[in-house]
Amino acid sequence: MTEPSTRHPSSSKLTGDVLMYALELGMPVHYLSGFGKHLGSALPAYSRNGQLRLAQYRRYEDQAQKLELMKAMVATKIHNQATVLYRHGVKEHPLKQRKASVAAQKTIDQVRGMEGLAAQEYFSYWSQMLKGNWQFSGRNRRPPTDPVNALLSFAYGL
């Protein structure tokens, strides 16, 4: 007796030539069911993962580069938070100054502090942005205590 196929009706087909080309480029090919279950993989004979991982570790050890990368990520996050506020009609807020002050920070902990302050300021505007019956008195988690925080935690988890 054979098992029913788990193939999704609109699944993609991969030709042998495409598979060979991907493997020649050093790209692994992973096969998933229509529901996203891993079925197997075709792996190249030579993997770049080792060299890539070593390069990542070298970058991680470079404190100056790590600080600059973190500043860029936090400044971008604050910029995106300011964009959300702007789209909801909040034109004046402290996030503009907070974003500018990220560049002046000298340590990773100081940058994290700026990120935390910006998040606190960002979420302080949510109660006036939400419409209808949605209530929001501030960010909380582990466990979230209201529907908005539950949705935020769920979305961050995804």
Image: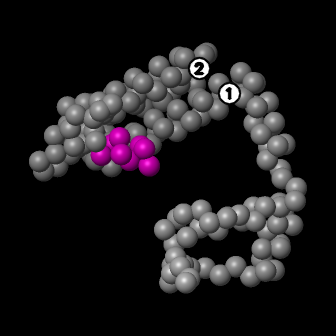
Q: Is residue 27 left or right of residue 96?
A: right
Instruction: Tell me the amino acid under the disc marked 2.
Output: Ile
Q: How far is the residue under mark 2 from the one under mark 1? A: 8 Å
Q: Is residue 10 visible?
A: no
Q: Are marks 2 and 1 in contact (CB under 8 Å)?
A: yes
Please state if 51 lies on the left or on the right of 132 as rendered: right
Residue pictured at 32% horizontal, 31% vertical: 141
Image point (46%, 27%), residue name:
115
Q: Can you give x and y, in whole percent of width and height, for residue 72 in the image?
A: 59, 34
Viewer-closest of 70 and 139 = 139
Camera-side residue of 95 and 52: 52
Is residue 109 or residue 154 the one in the foreground? 154
The 10 Å Cα crowd at callout 2, few under 14, some 14 to 19, many 20 or more, is some
Residue carrying label 1: 66
The quadrant in which residue 89 appears is top left
Q: Answer yes or no: is residue 22 visible.
A: yes
Task: Find residue 9 and report its horizontal and vertical position in percent.
Answer: 50, 84
Q: Which label sits on residue 41?
A: none
Residue sitting at 33 percent across and 49 percent down? 87
| Image quadrant containing the N terminus | bottom right
Residue picked out by circle 2: 108
Q: Which residues are magenta?
A: 151-158
Residue at the far front in the pictured view: 1
User: Which percent across, then down, holds residue 41?
Assistant: 71, 64
Name the outermost residue toward the left: 133
